[in-house]
Image (cartoon, coloured by chain):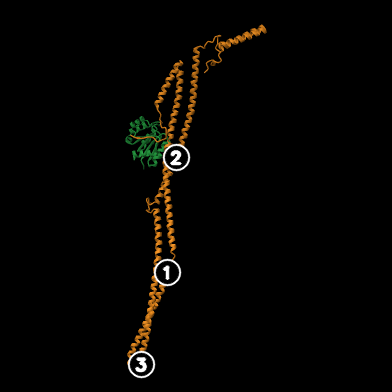
């Protein structure tokens, strides 16, 4: 069984495209519709990588990262931000919250795969 | 909304000049009536004209012949009322426009989401089929070329080479057999000559045997004539005769065997000759045909291999196209966020209009009310700038990647 990637995004199309890209490369993909859902799914099934959006209802990406970093099982799991936000201030906030990397939308499937392979193999 | 009277249209207001003109016309009418009619009618006319002038004077806000302005307090109240009504109208219209535009934008978002959903599924399937096509093309290439041989260890190209070589060997062997047969025919001729020679020697032996037999007979006759003295000689002569007969018998037996050998040789010679004289053109033509066919098969194989490589290349290009499409399809996420931002802006504008309206209503003094409203607007403008924009992308080029 491949490694598990949790994708958190309120946009169904982005979730689908992330799943489509990663599944074709042999990864197992779990989808969550917002930060809260992402947190529940992360607790329910240990993921090897979390890929989250920033602007989402209920709980945004930065808060999700902060909460996940508080959980022992997610202290050292790579968390990538995949968002339309591209300002340096937001990136700095992401880094401070414990994000492993920052990807600005729209993402190139090949580049996404390269980054995912780089962080979890 | 009503203030007790209809708003005053400045164009309709009675000026002093108009009022004097009106009075003059009335006086003229009254004079004419007095001149021509009964005094009683004249009284009635004067009373009526006076009543009309007074009514118009009051109704149009003119109390005297001079053009005095409307009292300031009444004017302010009227302006305030008008302003409030206007703001209420703006607020109501704004709300209805915001709601309608918001609904339109919701529909746009719904349509986009639906379309993207279907597009993503389509591209997913397309990608799957392209992958399958690519795998098939690769398996064809593997089966056909030498450098990427199949699991069985024999590629199609190798098979063609083997078949061609086998056919060539077979034809070469056939030609060789024919050549050997020709050699054999010559050898058989030599053997036949030898057999004839042996038969000739046997004839000599038989002739010698006959002469020996004749000599032995003569010797026996001579022995008989000699009487008792030739008795022993007669025995010897008989023995010699018997030997010559046996020699003759052996010679005939040998001749019989040699005849049989000769017959067998003849039949073998015929068979070998038939093999040797077989038309070798057929074998040569077959060889040529097999070579042509195999060359053609090799060409077809090469062309198919090339086509399979091209299919593979095209599949690669389609996969790259799908990759680009996946990037472009993310426009829905960007546009949805932009629409949400626009909707939030519209809601905020609506909210601001309401608050401004309220601020003006709350203050008895219209000037202070307006000042409060302006302060509110400035505060809103600052907070709006501070909120920032979630989407800054101007194009659908893939975004930056940064690993911390």
Can you say whether B174 is above or below B194 in the image? above
Residue at the image point whose x is 42% and y is 42% from the top: B319
Q: Which residue is mark 3?
A: B225
Disc 3 is placed on an element classified as helix
Between the C-alphas of marks 1 and 3, the distance is 63 Å
Mark 2 or mark 1, whichever is nearer to me: 1
Q: CA distance from mark 3 to mark 2?
A: 138 Å
Numbered label attached to residue B273: 1
Q: Are marks 1 and 3 in contact (CB under 8 Å)?
A: no
Both marks 1 and 3 on one chain:
yes
Q: Chain in green?
A: A
For the residues labelled 2 and 1, say whether their Cβ atoms are less than 8 Å apart: no
Which mark sits nearer the N-terminus, 3 or 2? Answer: 2
The answer to whether residue B106 of the structure is visible from this angle is: yes
User: Which of the 4 quarters of the picture holds residue B201?
Assistant: bottom left
What hue represents chain B?
orange
Element class at badge 1: helix
Residue A61 position (above or below residue B236): above
The chain carrying label 3 is B
Horizontal and vertical percent position of residue B387: 40, 27
Is residue A46 in view?
no
Residue where numbered disc 2 is placed: B121
Q: Which residue is nearer to you in this view: B302 or A114?
A: B302
Q: Nearer the viewer, mark 3 or mark 2?
A: 3
**Mark 2 or mark 1: whose residue is earlier in sequence:** 2
Location of the C terminus of chain A (image quadrant): top left
Q: Dividing the image into 4 quarters, which one contains the N terminus of chain A? A: top left
Q: Chain of mark 2?
A: B
How far is disc 2 from disc 1 in space, using C-alphas? Answer: 79 Å
């Amino acid at each position: 069984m491949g490694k598990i990637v949790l994708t958190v995004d309120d946009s169904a199309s982005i979730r689908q495209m992330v799943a489509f890209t990663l599944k074709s490369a042999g990864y197992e993909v779990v989808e969550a519709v917002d930060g809260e859902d992402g947190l529940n799914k992360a607790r329910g099934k240990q993921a090897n990588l979390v890929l989250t959006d920033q602007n989402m209802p209920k709980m945004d990406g930065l808060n999700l990262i902060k909460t996940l970093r508080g959980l022992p099982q997610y202290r050292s799991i790579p968390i990538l931000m995949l968002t339309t936000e591209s300002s340096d201030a937001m990136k700095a906030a992401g880094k401070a919250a414990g994000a492993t990397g920052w990807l600005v939308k729209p993402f190139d499937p090949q580049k996404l795969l390269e980054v995912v392979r780089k962080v979890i193999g | 909304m009503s203030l007790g009277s209809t708003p005053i249209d400045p164009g309709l207001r009675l000026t002093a000049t108009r009022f004097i003109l009106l009075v003059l016309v009335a006086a003229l009418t009254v004079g004419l009536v007095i001149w021509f009619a009964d005094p009683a009618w004249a009284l009635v006319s004067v009373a009526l004209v006076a009543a009309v002038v007074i009514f118009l004077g009051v109704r149009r806000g003119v109390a005297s012949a001079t053009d005095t302005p409307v009292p300031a307090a009444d004017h302010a109240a009227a302006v305030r009322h008008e302003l409030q009504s206007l703001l209420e109208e703006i607020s109501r219209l704004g709300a209805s426009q915001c709601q309608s535009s918001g609904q339109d934008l919701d529909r746009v978002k719904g349509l986009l989401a639906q379309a993207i959903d279907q597009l993503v599924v389509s591209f997913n399937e397309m990608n799957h089929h392209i992958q399958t096509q690519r795998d098939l093309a690769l398996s064809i290439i593997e089966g056909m070329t030498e450098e990427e041989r199949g699991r069985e260890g024999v590629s199609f190209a190798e098979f063609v080479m083997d078949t061609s070589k086998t056919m060539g060997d077979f034809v070469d062997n056939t030609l060789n057999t024919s050549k050997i047969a020709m050699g054999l025919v010559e050898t058989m001729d030599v053997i036949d000559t030898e057999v004839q020679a042996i038969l000739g020697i046997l004839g000599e032996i038989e002739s010698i045997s006959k002469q020996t037999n004749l000599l032995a007979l003569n010797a026996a006759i001579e022995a008989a004539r000699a009487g008792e003295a030739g008795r022993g000689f007669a025995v010897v002569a008989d023995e010699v005769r018997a030997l010559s007969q046996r020699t003759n018998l052996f010679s005939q037996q040998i001749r019989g065997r040699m005849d049989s050998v000769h017959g067998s040789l003849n039949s073998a010679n015929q068979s070998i000759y038939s093999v040797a004289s077989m038309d070798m053109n057929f074998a040569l033509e077959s060889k040529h045909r097999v070579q042509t066919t195999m060359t053609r098969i090799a060409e077809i194989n090469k062309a198919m291999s090339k086509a399979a490589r091209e299919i593979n290349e095209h599949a690669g290009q389609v996969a790259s196209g799908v990759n680009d499409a996946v990037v472009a399809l993310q426009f829905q996420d960007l546009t949805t966020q932009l629409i949400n931002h626009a909707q939030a802006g519209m809601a905020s504008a609506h909210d601001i209009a309401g608050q401004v309206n309220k601020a003006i209503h709350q203050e008895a003094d219209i000037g202070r009310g307006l000042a409060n409203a302006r302060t509110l607007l400035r505060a809103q403008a600052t907070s709006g700038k501070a909120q920032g924009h979630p989407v800054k992308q101007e194009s659908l080029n893939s975004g930056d990647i940064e690993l911390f």
